[in-house]
Image (cartoon, rainbow, N blue to C red):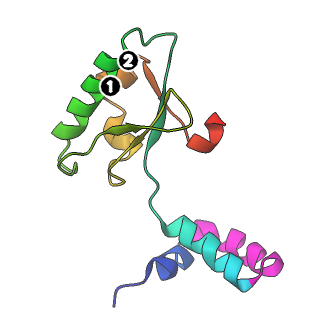
Amino acid sequence: KKLSKLGQVRKRPELVPLLDRLSQVLPAGTLDSVEKAFGTRRNTTFRLNTLKCDNEFETMQSLDDWIQTLPKSKKGAKAVRCPWARNAFTVSDASIGVKHLIDCPAHKAGKIHFQSLSSMI
């Protein structure tokens, strides 16, 4: 029997102490939302390093080309600009993680840095 996402989260040993503590201080509905968030894959996000990236178009084209070569990449997957942060981007395919992009030329050259959108506010 396959576990639901919520069931999978509850089976992760590293989260048990946190979930136990949260169950003592949060209402059940809120706790369910927190658990669902831990079970949801987050899209990879990054920002351009404006000190090293002298040609944004070229850097982004190189990154999109790299994404298309990945075996896990869905057709049409690409980096999409964040509407509220000029140098922030999200990879459109959530199955593409940092581990898939760590060796791309843009990252190796220091032109992009992986960073959560919440850290760019």
Question: Residue 23: within the magenta?
Answer: yes
Question: Which of the 4 image quadrants contains residue 16?
Answer: bottom right
Left or right: 2 in relation to 5: left
Q: Residue at x 56, y 32 (%)?
A: 85
Left or right: 80 in relation to 62: right
Vertical relation: 6 (above or below) 108: below
Picture coordinates of residue 68 (x, y %)? 19, 39
Question: Which of the 4 image quadrants contains residue 104?
Answer: top left
Q: Residue at x 50, y 26 (%)?
A: 87
Callout 1 amino acid: Met
The N terminus appears in which quarter of the rendering? bottom left
Q: Is the magenta stretch mostly helix, strand or loop?
A: helix
Vertical relation: 7 (above or below) 53: below
Per the model, the C-alpha gap separating discs 1 and 2 is 6 Å
Residue nearest the viewer, comparing 91 with 108:
91
Per the rendering, the mark at residue 76 is none
Q: Residue at x 20, y 42 (%)?
A: 70
Per the rendering, the mark at residue 56 is 2
Per the rendering, the mark at residue 60 is 1
Question: Residue 29: within the magenta?
Answer: no
Callout 2 amino acid: Glu
Q: Are marks 1 and 2 in contact (CB under 8 Å)?
A: yes
Picture coordinates of residue 55 (x, y %)? 36, 11
Q: Which residue is drawn at 31% across and 41% down?
A: 100
Vertical relation: 116 (above or below) 37: above
Picture coordinates of residue 65 (x, y %)? 20, 31
Residue interval drawn in magenta: 13-27
The C terminus appears in which quarter of the rendering? top right
